[in-house]
Image: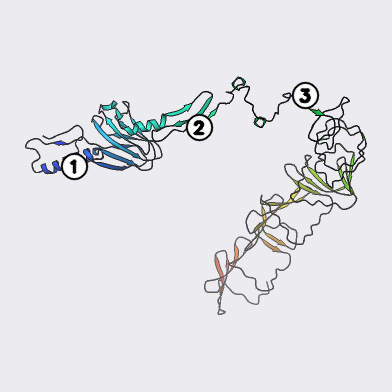
């Protein structure tokens, strides 16, 4: 009986076996040997882990027989390639072109695995030790990969350089610099003669003593100013933040801009002239009792004007009243009140007239327009349905509806008096007249007593009169008259 090798599963045929099939089995064996010796297979990954098939008793060449295998595809994460047989000693050359790392394992991987980075290849030995089988990378490419990923050059000490990776394929260039604070005063020679252009600006207070400077109290250009024995000095234009009090008089003309802050009190007279047309640098005038500009007066919390007042702004105008009310007055009397609380409203004192030159639009997103008298609802108009107006009396249900196809009166319609209509009645004190025809779509039904009277036009265009469900009268289009019961003529009892 035939057996199989424990590596590639080549069938070993014993004497007398495979009668009539020996040639086919031998060809399969040769194909397996061919794939295992120099065969190459490209396997496309499906963005999932993959088991490399290798049957113990193969009937044809399988992917696991090939000596060289390229894994391709577009994986979204690291994937694992598991060898199907964990008790076969095997050698493979793998090429990874999947976009992610590939982990090669035999068994459960506890004996050791091999990780192949994307774009790299590896030759691996698989010891076939069963569940704890070990996979070992014996290729030089893996060593080069490790060198490229983990061998860095750097310099430490007073001179430092950033770490540079070395993969053995090119020169190493280190960009070095002196560590901050590494050079101290003792490291500098007394004869170094450092040029003053190399010195930074001294910005720390008390780093230069008065004795090391040359200053004058005269009005000298490009000199450090020093006060004399009386504390005075001469100067041209002074640009500074004046934080003390100016107690003297300015008797000349102020022709430049005061660019500093004048935070003290001016107790003398300012008799000169500010000769610039606008003063953009004056941002505060202190506390003024009254300020008048042209004929506009600002006094306390009141802005007043003797004539018309126009507000013309390039953007929006915002009124922010924390008291929740804005008043519009006429000669001191309140005419309009805008309430800005949680339910904004407007109140008008006296008669209110709206006179517009175009349309008036009321857009109630809530769907209802309320009509009130002294805050009591007299009625409301429901506009929540497109192309339809629903009229309600008080807070009651719908009473009157105007739709795109007509007018509906709910609960009856009374014309000519103030009596409340009864349900579904149409009532008129006088005649209901029409300039032309009065047309109804179906029957005319009159209710009184135990049964209804109904007038209809029948299927043959005849005129019928019913009492209840019984037809009592028929007049056809030829003038023929048919009645149920007797006909009495010239009876004066009616």
SS at mark 2 in the image:
loop
Nearer to me, 418 or 160: 160
Q: Which mark is residue 224?
A: none
**Residue 99 in the image: above or below residue 369:** above
Indicate the quadrant containing the C terminus: top left, top right, bottom left or bottom right: bottom right
Name the image quarter holding residue 104: top left
Q: CA distance from mark 1 to mark 3?
A: 100 Å
Q: Tell whether 135 sits left or right of 479.
A: left
User: Mark 2 or mark 3, which is nearer the start of the sequence?
Assistant: 2
Residue that appears at 72% across and 52% down:
379
Residue hosting label 1: 31
Residue hosting label 2: 175
Under circle 1, the secondary element is helix
Q: Nearer the viewer, residue 102 or 154?
A: 154
Q: Is residue 295 left or right of residue 382?
A: right
Q: CA distance from mark 2 to mark 1?
A: 58 Å
Q: For the residues marked 3 and 2, what is the alpha-carbon distance in whole angstroms?
A: 44 Å
| The one of 78 and 116 positioned closer to us in this rendering | 116
Residue 49 location, quadrant: top left
Q: Residue at x 83, y 44 (%)?
A: 279
The location of residue 137, given as percent across then percent down, is 31, 30
Residue identified by numbered label 3 = 210
């Amino acid at each position: 009986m035939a057996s199989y090798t424990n590596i590639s599963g080549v069938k070993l045929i014993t004497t007398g076996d495979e009668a009539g099939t020996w040639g086919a089995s031998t060809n399969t064996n040769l194909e397996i040997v061919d794939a295992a010796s120099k065969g190459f297979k490209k396997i496309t990954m499906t963005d999932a882990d993959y088991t490399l098939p290798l049957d113990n008793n193969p009937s044809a060449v399988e992917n696991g027989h090939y000596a060289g295998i390229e894994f391709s595809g577009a994986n979204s994460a690291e994937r694992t390639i598991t060898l199907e047989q964990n008790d076969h000693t095997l050698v493979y050359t793998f090429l990874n072109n999947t976009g992610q790392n590939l982990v090669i394992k035999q068994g459960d991987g506890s004996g050791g695995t091999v990780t192949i980075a994307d774009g790299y290849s590896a030759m691996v030995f698989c010891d076939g030790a069963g569940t704890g089988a070990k996979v070992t990378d014996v290729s030089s490419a893996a060593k080069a990969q490790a060198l490229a990923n983990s061998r860095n050059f750097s310099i430490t000490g007073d001179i430092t350089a950033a770490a540079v990776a070395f993969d053995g394929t090119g020169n190493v260039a280190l960009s070095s610099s002196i560590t901050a604070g590494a050079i101290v005063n003792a490291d500098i020679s007394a004869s170094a003669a450092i040029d003053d252009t190399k010195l930074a600006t001294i910005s720390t207070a008390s780093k230069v003593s008065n004795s090391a400077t040359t200053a004058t109290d005269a009005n000298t250009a490009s000199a450090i100013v020093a006060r004399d024995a009386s504390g005075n000095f001469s100067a041209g234009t002074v640009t500074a933040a004046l934080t003390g009090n100016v107690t003297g008089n300015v008797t000349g003309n102020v022709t430049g801009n005061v660019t500093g802050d004048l935070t003290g009190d001016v107790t003398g007279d300012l008799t000169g002239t500010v000769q610039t047309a606008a003063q953009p640098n004056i941002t505060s005038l202190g506390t003024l009792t009254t300020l008048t500009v042209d004929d506009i007066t600002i006094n306390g919390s009141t802005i007043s004007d003797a004539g018309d007042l126009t507000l013309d702004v390039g953007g929006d105008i915002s009124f922010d009243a924390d008291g929740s009310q804005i008043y519009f007055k006429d000669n001191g009397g309140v005419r309009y009140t805008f309430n800005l609380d949680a339910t904004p409203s407007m109140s008008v004192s006296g008669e209110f007239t709206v006179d517009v030159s175009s349309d008036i639009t009321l857009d109630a997103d809530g769907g209802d327009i309320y009509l009130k008298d002294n805050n009591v609802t007299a009625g409301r108009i429901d506009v929540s349905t497109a192309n339809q107006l629903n009229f309600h009396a008080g807070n009651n249900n719908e009473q009157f509806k105007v739709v795109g196809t007509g007018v509906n009166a709910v609960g009856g319609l009374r014309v000519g008096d103030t009596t409340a209509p009864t349900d579904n009645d149409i009532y008129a004190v006088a005649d209901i007249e029409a300039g032309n025809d009065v047309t109804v779509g179906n029957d005319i039904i009159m209710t009184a007593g135990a049964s209804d009277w109904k007038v209809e036009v029948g299927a043959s265009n005849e005129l019928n009169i019913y009492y209840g469900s019984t037809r009592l009268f028929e007049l056809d289009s030829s003038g023929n008259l048919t009645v149920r019961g007797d006909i009495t003529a010239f009876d004066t009892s009616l």
